[in-house]
Image: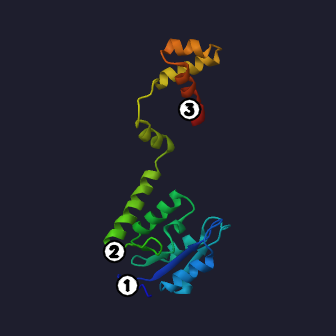
Amino acid sequence: MNLIPARGGMLLGYARTSTGGASLESQIDALTGAGVDPARIYTDGAGAHGRPGWFALLDYARAGDTAVVVGIDRLGRTVTEVLTGARALTDRSIGLRSLREGVDTSDPAGSMVVGVLASLSVLDEQSPARRHAATASVGRPRALDDRQIASAQRMRANGQSVQAIAESLGVSRATLYRTLAERRSVR
């Protein structure tokens, strides 16, 4: 089955192994079976530091080319790498085809999926504090605000009992224990 890109660019394959992941050989077979020239398949092994194969593909690729992967997860080891990879391709007008998921940016639906992935990478670049703040408002309001929590921490550090602190703040001991534990785990 030959998958010649509609825009007239080249098909460029990318294969990456990870611990317990698909072998390079099986990915290369799938890519060549999809019409990618074996000389244009870039690879990174599980021990590859810095993903040299991925960056070589990006260096070689031109607008109108199409990167072909066996699965969208081959774009990176983490969600952030996958999202960043999709965004890098989109920003450079390089198409993307994922054989397993059937994503193809020459198709409007596939283009939308990759566009959503690329836009998610922008959200993923937010600082952890901003992400936490964006999700912190979901659910019940907190019993104690930041000022009260800081006061409770000072009181506890000065040796006051949890019962006395909870009474002074008007919350249960369980709420105070949970709040202090959550604050410790955020650090």
The residue closer to the viewer here, 99 or 75, is 99
Res. 173 image quadrant: top right
Label 1, secondary structure: give it: loop
Marks 1 and 3, the one that precedes in the sequence? 1
| Amino acid identity at mark 3 | Glu
Q: Position of residue 34 (x, y in %)?
A: 48, 83
Mark 2 vs mark 1: in front: 2
Marks 2 and 1, the one that precedes in the sequence? 1
| Amino acid identity at mark 1 | Gly
Q: Position of residue 168 (x, y in %)?
A: 51, 12
- At a point 38% along the width and 65% down the height, the residue shown is 113
Q: Mark 3 points at which residue?
A: 182
Above or below, comparing residue 31 to residue 92 in the picture: below
Label 2, secondary structure: give it: loop
Say the numbered circle drawn on residue 8. Answer: 1
Q: Distance between the residues labelled 1 and 3?
A: 55 Å
- At a point 59% along the width and 35% down the height, the residue shown is 185
Applied colour scheme: rainbow
Say the numbered circle drawn on residue 107. Answer: 2
Q: Position of residue 4 (x, y in %)?
A: 41, 85
